[in-house]
Amino acid sequence: MKMLRFRSPSIRSLDQEVLCTIRLLDDSEISCTIQKETKGQFLLDHVCNHYNLLEKDYFGIRYVDPEKQRHWLEPNKPVVKQMKSLQPFTMCFRVKFYPHEPMKIKEELTRYLLYLQLKRDIYHGRLLCPFAEAAYLGACIAQAELGDYDPEEHPSDYIRDFKLFPKQSLKLERKIMEIHKNELRGQCAALAELNMLQRAHSLETYGVDPHPCKDFTGSTAFLGFTATGFVVFQGNKRIHLLKWGDVSKLKFEGKTFYVIGVQKEKKLVLTFHTSTPAACKHLWKCGVENQAFYKCAKSSQIKTVSSSNIFFKGSRFRYSGKVAKEVIEASSKIQRDPPEVHRAQFGQSRSFNSLSHKNLIMNMEPLVPALPSTNEYEEAAADPAGVVAVKDPVPLSPLEPSAASAADTEQSCAERRSSSLINDLQPHCVSMETPYLPPLTPKAEDGLEEDDEGGGALTISELAYSPCASMLPTPVEDSQGGVNQLFSSPVQSPARLLRELHADPDIQAQLEAERERDREFERTRLAARSRMSGVLASSLRLLSSNERVNTWVLGVARFVAVLMGVLLITVPTLLLLLESDIDVSFLHEIRQTPEFEQFHYEYYCPLRRWILCKISMAMENLWSD
């Protein structure tokens, strides 16, 4: 019998094995089998072991449920309970927390994986940037994957055959080729990738995983969480930035997401509406995780967060990983030989055409743009500035003027760190001439910093911020209505209801009458409270003026305190004697005394039966009702 009990769980576990396929950042795939109780941390460790990756706290595994809602795989919960899709499971390995300062990453392997993620962000329209920045980032990608420009290998329009940006104009391609030919010559792949990270992390949309929402006016906005704080984008502007130190609470109810914080010593409540309750909950959990990762100094300071202020209502969630400061400290203590970096070759990536100077195919068809656009090659020739007119949204609140000075300080520190890192990488590069390393902040961005200091909305690009449909919580193609299709419903939107309320005079009159009743009730309540406080104050003055009354009151208070203390000690001891079966010598002796037995059978037992009878009757009445 013992042998049967031992072997039966193993036989059952064989039937519960599940095949998992994980798609990596270069679109290659690895597979493994898991048991029913296997937790998410096992899969993350499996991928990190595949890469030989130690700095793994920046990464996570993402999956999509049958309703096309994205989720991050929670490491402390079983995988099978989180996945609602049919087997086999398919997931993606992605960067979950973008390093605030990529120069502090210790190993080249981690920087390469971050480079792959940023390349995906550029292609899918998440990393939006001005024209000059886009050209430099594209040139870094070309240098990293093609190497130095070779006129015999690369024709005059070699960049045109590869899709790097969702809207890739002829003007942009020419600028990329110019920088690639003249400024980046001699840089190895690792150095080109480092230059890309150095430039990308200074952009406003660096690390933004956009969540499409509607504000109270019904306008589409993209919410995101960065190392700095909570950001909101509309059109081509960042209209709001609330730093993590100023965010006091994130919560959601149904499809409504709330950000509660303090700005300029005033309470601030921002309200947004998502397409589904699942999208709203995913947005809330992402905000809670990012706030804990970037704000807390230690993981022991992380607390469980509730989505509602009402007890036993809403969702409860706690981020269970390390925080940013702990990750940086752990990276600085890594002592091992750098692992070998296996860079993806041509044809391995399905999200866009990977570049490779070894297998360059010049006559391939260009990929379909991730965003629909007009013929931008003619637009670039007609409009030398390349500016798209976008309606300026009204900013929710001004940005803080001290951000520019803080950015300058961080920039100087980053330059010093990057220079030392570049010196480490440079001996391993085959250099034909002295590599050119442009400054972190180009002159083209000076005007943006001035706009930031002026208190207005910050323009981040000539193009509107509109990530492609594949990255939305519920993917909808632009041809089918885009983001607005997510919110199409027979139920009227809050913005439409708000406009109707403002337009209807009868409703306005009813609202004004309700406000007047509320004000009258508030005045009555305040008057009653003032009368009650006056009576209490007069009573206290009467008591304090009479010394005999004060002595009597003090004596009564002492008696009550002593009585409560005696009851707190006596009642538990009595219950221990009467109800417990603990066989201790002195308890056994007390139970054997005649006085205790008389009390137990004549008083305690009848009292207990009477209480139990009353409780059972009350429960029967409740069930019958």
Image (tube, rainbow, N blue to C red):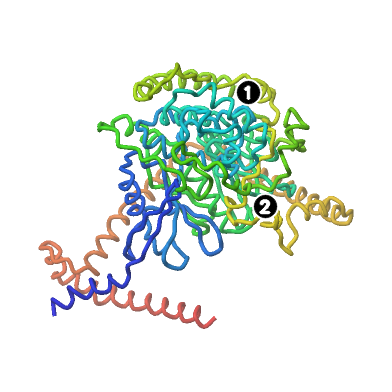
Residue extending furthest toward the left: 585
Relative image position of residue 249 (x, y in whole percent): 54, 43
**Res 5 → quadrant:** bottom left
The residue at 60%/42% (across/down) is 125
**Vertical placement of residue 451 versus 547, above or below:** above
Secondary element type, mark 1: helix
The residue at 76%/48% (across/down) is 519
| Residue closest to the eye, 201 or 573 | 201
The residue at 74%/64% (across/down) is 490
The residue at 50%/50% (across/down) is 350
Figure quadrant of the C terminus: bottom right
Residue 332 in view = yes
Q: Is residue 619 left or right of residue 269?
A: left
Residue under label 2, please give it: 483
Residue extending furthest toward the front: 152
Amino acid residing under circle 1: Glu
First in sequence, mark 2 or 1: give its number: 1
Relative image position of residue 557 (x, y in whole percent): 41, 46
Q: Is residue 42 left or right of residue 371?
A: left
**Res 568 → quadrant:** bottom left
**Res 389 → quadrant:** top right
Amino acid residing under circle 2: Val
Relative image position of residue 373 (x, y in whole percent): 71, 45
**Vertical placement of residue 106 versus 30, above or below:** above
Secondary element type, mark 2: helix
Determine crowd level at label 1: few under 14, some 14-19, many 20+ residues with C-alpha closer than 10 A.
some
Residue under label 1, please give it: 445
